[in-house]
Image: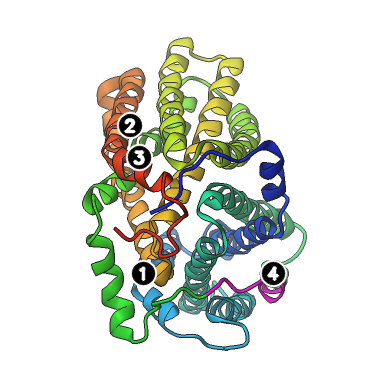
């Protein structure tokens, strides 16, 4: 499934961190994160400014469905190669990025007040091409990095993603105070050149033997191959449970901070500023540590830190309105969150068989999003019933089943870490 060998020297770690392939992971992450909020908060701000009613604005959120349904067309990207000269991954990547840039520019030609449906259709094109880009970027990163490099690659990709989101949302809204929204979208479309140039100059990953030759193989074989593995169902359960407590706690932190009497300025300064950099630092630290510890040990260590950081919110509930306590808890929680996310994403990437990377990763990442949707609804009721301390202690306990499942994987993870070389076929069992 993956190599879990913590044998890199400090010099080797620095060499990997500074390599061109890690720069590609960072820039592709940026290209992936940029479009997301252009169809979210930025578009909502434009529609609000134009006087569109709240009901319509809310319905436009449905244009984000391609992000959760991307596994449906991922097999096509595994099966076909558009341009032989570019290769299977770079060909699809270049096409999706060019179309994405045009779609973002296309939003600038719409008129929210006159034709909300036209805006929604343009936004739907953006999310479809953005989701398609995500499919190929995830597959490219899996295939271009060695198994032991997946953690660092994931952390750089996630951090690039966050920078792209920050530029689009924060930068886009700031620009909108000085120039019209259509001009903002044209500038953001031009920024997609970062991803296009990265695609043109990066190297195509080696094609694995046994890649699908028919559409039937591309659709059916990824499922058959995955469910033929040891602990296949438990791995899916682990993916849903590993960050469940963290997700539940994060969903209620803003109401929690407000309830403790913190002002919006205090929350904005501490949570948004310190929290952002703590997540970025945690992701980078997690990626580097994974080169030394391996995936299995990292999942354990970062999972424990996540659980402890959740319980620190219960301590803050006892302290009450204490800015130093808020800053300490936020930094600790976000550092743990960033580290845990790096290991989590690397684990999912390493699970994919390189013959079906796009399809299997799209499936796993869609599954990863299920808890975020399902657990969001009852968290408010739980917090009201249990109180803040009880709620965060419950979230801490919910982190335990995911860690327990890790003990079930130790046998085959250790076996593969002792294998002579990483399996080129990915996660075949």
Image disc number at residue 71: 1
Task: Residue under label 4, please give it.
Answer: 198
Answer left or right for 85 relative to 309: right
Residue drawn at 68 percent across, 70 percent down:
202
User: SS for tag 1?
Assistant: helix
Q: Nearer the viewer, residue 142 or 60?
A: 142
Image disc number at residue 242: 3
Task: Residue under label 2, please give it.
Answer: 399
User: Vertically, is 358 above or below 164?
Assistant: below
The alpha-carbon separation of the residues under discs 2 and 4 comes to 38 Å
Question: Mark 2 packing: few (<14 Cα in 10 Å), some, or many (20+)?
Answer: many
Answer left or right for 361 relative to 82: left
N-term mark: 3 or 4: 4
The alpha-carbon separation of the residues under discs 3 and 1 comes to 22 Å
Q: Quadrant of residue 280?
A: top right
User: Vertically, is 167 above or below 386?
Assistant: below
């Amino acid at each position: 499934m993956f190599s879990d060998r913590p044998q890199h020297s400090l010099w080797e770690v620095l060499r990997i961190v500074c390599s061109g392939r890690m720069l590609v992971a960072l820039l592709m992450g940026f290209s992936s994160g940029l479009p997301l909020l252009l169809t979210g908060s930025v578009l909502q701000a434009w529609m609000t400014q134009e006087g569109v009613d709240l009901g319509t604005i809310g319905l436009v959120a449905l244009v984000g469905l391609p992000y959760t349904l991307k596994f449906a067309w991922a097999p096509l990207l595994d099966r076909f190669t558009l341009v032989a000269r570019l290769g299977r991954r770079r060909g699809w990547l270049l096409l999706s990025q060019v179309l994405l840039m045009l779609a973002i520019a296309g939003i600038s030609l719409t008129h929210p007040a006159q034709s909300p449906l036209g805006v929604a259709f343009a936004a739907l094109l953006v999310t479809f091409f953005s989701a398609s880009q995500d499919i190929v970027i995830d597959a490219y990163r899996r295939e271009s990095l060695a198994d032991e490099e997946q953690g660092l690659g994931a952390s750089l990709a996630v951090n690039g993603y966050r920078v792209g989101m920050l530029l689009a949302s924060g930068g886009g809204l700031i620009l909108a105070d000085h120039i019209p929204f259509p001009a903002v979208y044209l500038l953001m479309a031009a920024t997609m050149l970062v991803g296009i140039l990265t695609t043109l100059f990066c190297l195509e990953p080696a094609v694995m033997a046994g890649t699908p030759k028919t559409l039937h193989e591309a659709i059916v074989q990824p499922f058959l191959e995955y469910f033929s593995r040891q602990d296949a169902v438990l791995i899916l359960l682990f993916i849903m449970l590993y960050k469940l407590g963290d997700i539940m706690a994060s969903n209620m932190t803003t109401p929690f901070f407000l309830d403790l009497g913190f002002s919006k300025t205090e929350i904005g300064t501490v949570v948004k500023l310190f929290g952002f950099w703590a997540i970025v630092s945690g992701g980078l630290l997690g990626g580097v540590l994974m080169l030394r510890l391996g995936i299995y040990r990292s999942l354990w260590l970062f999972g424990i830190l996540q659980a402890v950081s959740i319980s620190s919110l219960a301590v803050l509930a006892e302290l009450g309105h204490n800015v130093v306590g808020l800053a300490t808890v936020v930094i600790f929680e976000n550092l743990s969150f960033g580290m845990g996310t790096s290991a989590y994403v690397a684990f999912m990437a390493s699970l994919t068989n390189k013959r079906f990377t796009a399809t299997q990763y799209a499936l796993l990442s869609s599954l990863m999003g299920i808890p975020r949707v399902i657990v969001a609804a009852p968290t408010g009721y739980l917090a009201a019933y249990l109180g803040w301390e009880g709620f965060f202690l419950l979230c801490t306990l919910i982190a335990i089943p995911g860690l327990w499942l890790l003990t079930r994987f130790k046998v085959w993870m250790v076996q593969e870490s002792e294998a002579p070389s990483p399996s080129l076929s990915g996660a075949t069992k």
